[in-house]
Image (spheres, rainbow, N blue to C red):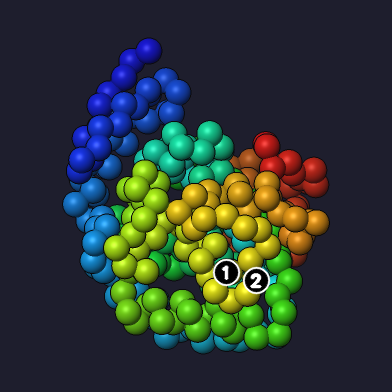
Amino acid sequence: MKKKMLLLPGIVVFLGFSCTGLTPEDLGVLLRDLPKHNSSRYITRHSLPEEYFRAAYRALDDPHIYIVLSDTGSPASKIIGLFTASPYNHISLAFDPALETLVSYNGGNGASLPGLNRERPEHLNRKPDAALVVFRLRTAPGQKEALINRITAINREGSSYNLLGLLSKKSKLPNIMFCSQFVYTLLDEAGASYFDKEKGDVRPMDFIRLAGRSPLEFAGKISFNSPNSSDSRYGAANFGMNGVKNFSPNS
């Protein structure tokens, strides 16, 4: 097996290219972006515009939030795959069924600093078989607004994306997180969490595998590059149009 060695601050990780799908180009992106990551201070502030929050508050009439698992093919998602052994290695949260308010912690995608960032479904289309799996979770009165308020606070206080938290499992400041830690922390603080696990140990597929008594409703799967995939509007009516009705958390 051909292997490369990636040097992280204080960490040596051996990457088997044939197992992870990492390419030399991916390695170059990771090494280029690594200095932008920070595990001790906030580097991203006011990344979400006022328009984002207006859209989020307009969605309060819908009692659901939308949990989106993605298989993006990004270098970071391949690294996370080393620890999760799962095809879905990124998780995002939205307040509306059209996913106009999609948000998560990420590496910035080359356009923003790593941390809390708005996402677009099309931004998650990074490989030939990229896909999104969308679930919705019904919230109790006040919970959805509490989630938006917490995101508002993070946006104001600052954030950083903590990819190294996969190993250290701890952050020096509360708003330094990776994607699944972010979503779980928000749900937990709003009283909407539906499984118990240490925040540093939560991985994207835990939201499905550890769901007790099926609190999640499967909304659909968007396969970007499939001949039967949904169109670019990603509206609620498009969820499931590719005929995927039997999603398994192990798929």
Q: Position of residue 61 (x, y in %)?
A: 70, 85
Three-letter residue code for mark 2: Ala
Instruction: Work out which quarter of the rendered image holds the N terminus and state it.
Output: top left
Residue that appears at 23% across and 66% down: 41
Tell which of 153 and 235 is nearer to you: 153
Relative to 142, say whether 109 is above or below.
above
Q: How many marks?
A: 2
Q: Position of residue 203 (x, y in %)?
A: 53, 49
Instruction: Work out which quarter of the rendered image holds the C terminus and state it.
Output: top right
Which of the labelled discs sits on residue 192, or is there none? 2
Residues marked 1 and 2 touching at CB (< 8 Å): yes
Q: Position of residue 21 (x, y in %)?
A: 42, 28
Which of the labelled discs sits on residue 188, or is there none? 1
- Element type at marker 1? helix
Residue that appears at 29% across and 55% down: 110
Whether residue 102 appears in this view of the structure is: no
Residue that appears at 46% across and 77% down: 151
Three-letter residue code for mark 1: Asp
Relative to 142, say whether 1 is above or below.
above
